[in-house]
């Protein structure tokens, strides 16, 4: 009997202790599940997904996006995969869907591979727009284009032609082979080269540095080795042009191989001042990010739906109009800006 009573008392003690622990433990909950696209303060969540981490251009663009979203009172989420792959972006987008963000702005690593996951996001009410590097029209509501693609392509051929005296071999050092914006610019470069005035210029290769510094350096070195008579390199990528400038400088080829393309003034100032890159072009990535932020907000608030001809106010970026973009629609910023020895000093500390 005593043995039975002891067992009973022990069991009772365990049960009482478990009950006490249960009452005292905090309850797990998710504000995201309860509040959808809003955080605990009622702010809507706006996400930007760039191509990869460690990209100076992308960092500046995300700075602009953050500034715009905070100006309209939203919460900012900035994400990028370690490598510039569609697979890395797909994983991030799946996470953002779970977080129930209000909008996703993405610089796509692949035009078509992201379609299933972006459609999934849109089916759940998330406003999806692409920026800088477009995804296909089925994968987004509209695209934010940093400048006129035709002018970006043609002007770089005009530039390199002038730099090499209208004759010689040239090469293009691009980002990834799937980058929509890069491929479109290169198409326009090739169309510009069809003009008879470029008859003495030969495009020998389009190389891909994948927007990775080390690979871009290696690809530049490979171009110089394979084409010892190379006269010019066009790099329509901020990572690529800086890598090309470094290689040309390190190898003492200043004046023998000209470098132009699209670069950040802060990274290219020394190469412009030394003459390795007589001039190059870009737009302000901070402004591109701002426009993406204001566009996302206009979509979320219902001010625009992405239809052709709609207009909206984009803070300090002024009034913007939605225009045609192949099968879809887009917001298009102005022409690329020329940076050379006459103005690089005033811009190199800006971005």
Image (cartoon, helix red, strand yellow):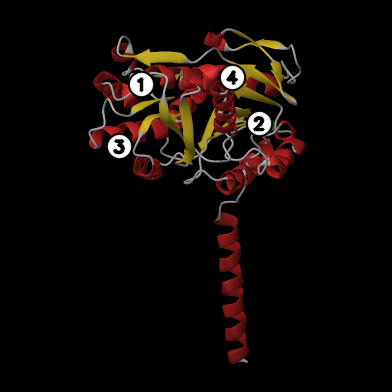
Q: Which mark is residue 123?
A: none
Is residue 26 placed above or below 20 in the rendered structure? above
Q: Do callouts 2 and 1 mark residues in contact (Cβ within 8 Å)?
A: no
Label whose residue precedes the other's in the sequence (3 or 1)? 3
Q: Which mark is residue 102?
A: 2
Give neighbour class at mark 4: few <14, some 14-19, many 20+ (Cα, 10 Å). Answer: some
- In which quadrant of the rendered image does the C terminus lie? top left
Q: Do callouts 3 and 1 mark residues in contact (Cβ within 8 Å)?
A: no
- For the residue pair 162 and 28, the one nearer the viewer reads as 162
| Separation of residues labelled 2 and 4 (CA atoms) | 33 Å
Residue hosting label 3 = 247
Residue hosting label 4 = 150
Residue hosting label 1 = 265
- For the residue pair 200 and 104, the one nearer the viewer reads as 200
Horizontal side of residue 320 vs 71, given as left or right: right
Tell me the mark number nearer the camera, choosing from 4 and 1: 4
Give neighbour class at mark 3: few <14, some 14-19, many 20+ (Cα, 10 Å). Answer: some
Q: Do callouts 4 and 1 mark residues in contact (Cβ within 8 Å)?
A: no
| Separation of residues labelled 3 and 1 (CA atoms) | 18 Å
- When asked about the image quadrant of residue 298, the answer is top right
**Can I make out residue 67 in this image?**
no
């Amino acid at each position: 009997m005593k043995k039975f009573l002891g067992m009973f008392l022990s069991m009772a003690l365990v049960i009482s202790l478990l009950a006490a622990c249960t009452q005292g433990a905090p309850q797990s909950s998710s504000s995201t599940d309860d509040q959808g696209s809003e955080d605990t303060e009622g702010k809507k969540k706006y996400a930007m997904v760039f191509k990869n981490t460690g990209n100076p251009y992308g960092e500046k663009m995300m700075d602009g996006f953050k500034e715009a979203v905070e100006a309209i009172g939203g919460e900012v989420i900035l994400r990028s995969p370690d490598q510039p792959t569609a697979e890395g972006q797909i994983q991030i987008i799946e996470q953002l869907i779970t977080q129930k963000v209000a909008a996703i702005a993405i610089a796509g690593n692949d035009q078509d591979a992201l379609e299933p996951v972006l459609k999934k996001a849109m089916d759940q009410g998330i406003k999806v727009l692409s920026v800088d590097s477009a995804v296909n029209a089925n994968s987004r509501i509209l695209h934010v284009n940093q400048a006129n693609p035709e002018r970006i392509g043609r002007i770089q051929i005009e530039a390199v032609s002038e730099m090499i005296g209208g004759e010689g071999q040239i090469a293009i050092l691009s980002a990834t082979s799937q980058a929509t914006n890069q491929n479109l610019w290169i198409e326009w470069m090739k169309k510009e080269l069809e003009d008879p005035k470029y008859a003495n210029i030969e495009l020998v290769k389009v190389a891909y540095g994948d927007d990775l510094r080390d690979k871009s350096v290696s690809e530049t070195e490979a171009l110089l080795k394979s084409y010892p008579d190379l006269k010019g390199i066009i790099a329509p990528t901020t990572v690529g042009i800086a890598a090309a400038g470094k290689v040309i400088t390190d190898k003492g080829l200043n004046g023998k191989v000209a470098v132009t393309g699209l670069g950040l003034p802060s990274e290219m100032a020394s190469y412009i001042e030394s003459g390795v890159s007589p001039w190059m072009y870009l737009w302000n990535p901070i402004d591109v990010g701002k426009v993406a932020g204001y566009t996302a907000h206009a979509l979320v608030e219902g001010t625009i739906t992405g239809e052709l001809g709609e207009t909206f106010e984009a803070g300090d970026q002024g009034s913007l109009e939605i225009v045609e973009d192949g099968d879809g629609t887009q917001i298009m910023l102005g022409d690329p800006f020329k940076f050379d020895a006459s103005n690089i000093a005033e811009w190199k500390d800006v971005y």
